[in-house]
Image (tube, helix red, strand yellow):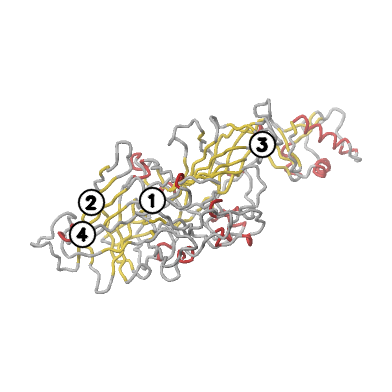
Amino acid sequence: MKKIFKNMAWTMAATLVMAACSDSLDESSGNGNDLNTDGTGYVKIALNLPSTSGTSTRADSENDDFNDGLAAEYNVNDVILALFYGADESSATYKWATQLPNLNFVNQGTSTDNITTKSNYVVSEVPKPSTGEKVFALAIVNNSGYFSVSNNKLNYNAAGTNPSTEFSGTFAALFTTASNTDLTKIASTTANENKGNFMMTNAPIAKQPSVTSTNTTGWNPDITTLVELKVYDDKPTAEAAPSNPIYVERVVAKVNVKVNAASNTLTIKEGETFAGATVEFTGWELQNTNKLTYLVRNVGSGDKAAWKDWIKLFSTDPTVSSKENRFVGTQPDPYRTYWGIDPNYNTIVKSGEITNNFNVWSETSAPQKWLELANNGTTAGLEAVAYCAENTTIAKVMQKDQLTGILLKATFKLSGTDGVDFFTCNGVNQIYTKENMLAALTAELAASSKEDVKLGENEKLAIKEDAGGAEIKNIEDLKKVFQITGGTTNPNELSDDQANVILNKYSTINFYKGGRTYYYATLIKHFGEEYTPASGVNSLDNYSEKDHLGRYGVLRNNWYELLINSVSGPGDPEIPVIPEEPADKEHRYINCEINVLSWAKRSQGVDL
């Protein structure tokens, strides 16, 4: 599986230096040396949104394809600066926050690069640390109603409405508190006069690049999320001091789907069972997205931080050509990290509770409006995209019904037809036309030894006009699709005996109304085949953290592109129920190639 990484500059570099006692941020403190004696200092802030921010080690150099995305994804509507005080990131306790006024961002890029912007500012009245105490900064860009500031107090509400409860405690208390995922607030391209509103918070950054498993001596990437700041007593010294960069990332992932054809129609190749048939893709949606999220990426902190385990993992698979640690990048400024923990990371959710944790489309709650697919003729940047919350798991929890994937809607057209009714039976790769299916079922009834099962002289088996596509497994399902016409009662329902005779011969009948079909195309792969190959997995026990952690999942700040390359047969006649089985247990018609744009961009090709 080939991945293309388009590193989306979803980072914002911010320089912070401690600041003054005047309520006017750029105003002098009033004494001759701008020296504060009241326990406050100066913080100088330079917020930068660069067009590129570093690459991923998860692709060869020719795949390091950078993409800025949409201008709306970079809009800054508001910035909160929250400060934590203590000996280190894990023990530092929140103390002070400020809502910055409207910053004057200036475009620093070319005329075609509308992403790179920069703003300089000086913040005042920041409390000085005590002796031996350090100050650490968290930036919250576009608070989206989850946070607010009043009297230098940071308020937080996990529901994203009317934040009025003051946050307190360590940084871990923030990144381990789950918030409701409201994409209208944290990932909107239409909010604020069509300028967009994407929530961003600090990105975990490594101090050293990735290494191979044969070169780990002295390697300590020391991944941190908060940024340590220096406090200055006077304004001139603060202004002259070097910058302390804060890199922020959007709290959502991004996905789009393309068909590898000039139109959205693929033809099944010669040699396949259904050669000559075509599939026209008419829409797509994300399936199984997370209802909960951490608003700051959780990689852990302190002695037992999760990242300290991840950096020990190197693939043992002989087919993996590159053996570097996959969780840390190699491009400097900054060295990015590529994994995180979501609110249901370690848990296999019970089947009856799946919808409590994930947004799941079903036949009874189908999308009202499907997203459009792009194709080879689509103008770059105009494809429909979707955003979702982070959804990651440990390797032992990589089960299909807990991972985010793609649901595709299509019309399967038999050779020489334009979307007609057809059937498949008993899982056999053979298509029955409507006429053939009715004839086969009629013959089955006629062969019965029970006279009351046979059709009457003028009776015929027919398909109900209002019948929709269906997977028929029982008597009730059968009666929803078929009826008897031409009798004394017209139309008439099949009897239970008649239905049982049919089901004894055809235990499963798939009815494709007008050729409509659905593909639960693929689970979205994060590291995918290049770094975490897997095959023949029939049990979750076949997965290991060393070889497979991160194989599947969606991570914030990553852009996943699904490229549909080919189709080999029809999918499901109705929106399929996601099975409770390992992610790599294959029995589908679709296979994908994913490109991750980082935005990082990951492209995943699909053969259906």
Residue 413, position in %: x, y?
65, 30
**Which residue is situated farthest in the bottom direction here?**
131
Query: Which of the pair 218/228 is nearer the observer?
Result: 218
State if disc 2 and disc 3 touch (CB < 8 Å). no
Q: Position of residue 561 (x, y in %)?
A: 50, 43
Q: Which residue is mark 2?
A: 120
Identity, as a three-letter code, of the amino acid under mark 2: Asn
Q: Residue 369, can we see it?
A: no
Comparing marks 4 and 3, which lies closer to the viewer?
Answer: 4
Does label 4 or label 1 sit earlier along the sequence?
A: 1
**Percent position of residue 245, x then y:** 30, 56
**Left or right: 326, with 89 as reference point:** right
Looking at the rendered image, the disc whose residue lies closer to the viewer, 1 or 2, is 1
For disc 4, the marked residue is: 241
The residues bearing labels 4 and 1 have C-alpha atoms spaced at a distance of: 25 Å
Of the numbered discs 3 and 1, the one sitting upstream in the chain is: 1
In terms of depth relative to the viewer, which is nearer, 307 or 401? 307
Q: From the top left corner, tell me how far across and down residue 166 is, in percent.
A: 34, 63
Task: Give the CA distance from mark 1 to mark 2.
Answer: 23 Å
Q: Secondary structure at mark 4?
A: loop
Please give the label number shown on residue 54: 1
Which mark is drawn over residue 468?
3
* Mark 4 residue type: Ala
Under circle 1, the secondary element is: loop
Q: Earlier in the sequence, mark 4 or mark 2?
A: 2
